[in-house]
Amino acid sequence: ALTIRYARLAPGQVVWDIGAGSGSLTVEAARLVPGGCVFAVEREAQAVLLVQRNCQLFGVDNVRVVHGEAPAVLSGLPLPDRVLVGGSGGKLPEILACCGELLTSGGMIVVNALTPATLCASLSGLSLPPFAALDGRQVQVSRLEKLGSEYFFRAQNAVYILFARKEG
């Protein structure tokens, strides 16, 4: 929900969901950009099938699934107004550089990072031109679990959400 919020999606936009995984962000984005299109980029064949299945299940028809590895497959897509990066296959610096070139002026990019290495690569790439207004959030939740006759909250891993705008 926070990733979608920070992307500032609007009708008619072209969105790239890089590392689409199950397609959960793809489906939510597709609902928020009527008249636009979401390109779900995914390198894993099983995940591609899952994205396609979830798009059918939730009735979104403005999604195009792109089976391939970013950034190689990005240059043939329509220029994005918004980019969501959920997975990078270890190529985050290259993906951010490509998005810096192809993202429309004033467009937004949102990166979800789970590991310190991905966080550092995101900060490095998004803190340089053409990106501006870098901001971010660390989100961490805890889950209620039972320990003997007591209950406690066990902390889950944090997620870092970084977002920036392409200077116009």
Image (cartoon, helix red, strand yellow):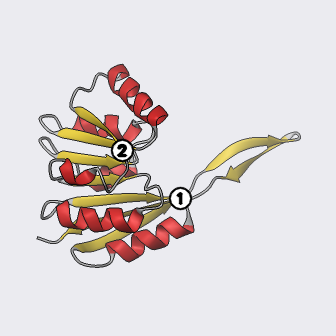
Can you say which quadrant of the picture contains the N terminus? top left
Q: Are marks 1 and 2 in contact (CB under 8 Å)?
A: no
Decide: is 80 above or below 165.
Answer: above
Whole-percent x, y for residue 57 in the image: 37, 20
Query: Disc 1 designates what residue?
Result: 114
| Above or below, comparing residue 23 to residue 55 in the picture | below
Q: Is residue 81 left or right of residue 6?
A: left
Which residue lies under the disc numbered 2?
68
The residue located at (44%, 71%) in the rendering is 121
Q: Nearer the viewer, residue 69 or 10?
A: 69
Q: Provide the secondary structure element on which disc 2 rests.
A: loop
Quarter of the image that includes the C terminus: bottom left
Tell me where residue 161 appears, x and y as whole percent. Answer: 42, 60
| Amino acid tagged 1 | Leu
Task: Give the residue drawn at x 11%, y 41%.
Answer: 12
7 over 94 or under it: above or below: above
- Residue closer to the observer: 33 or 153: 33
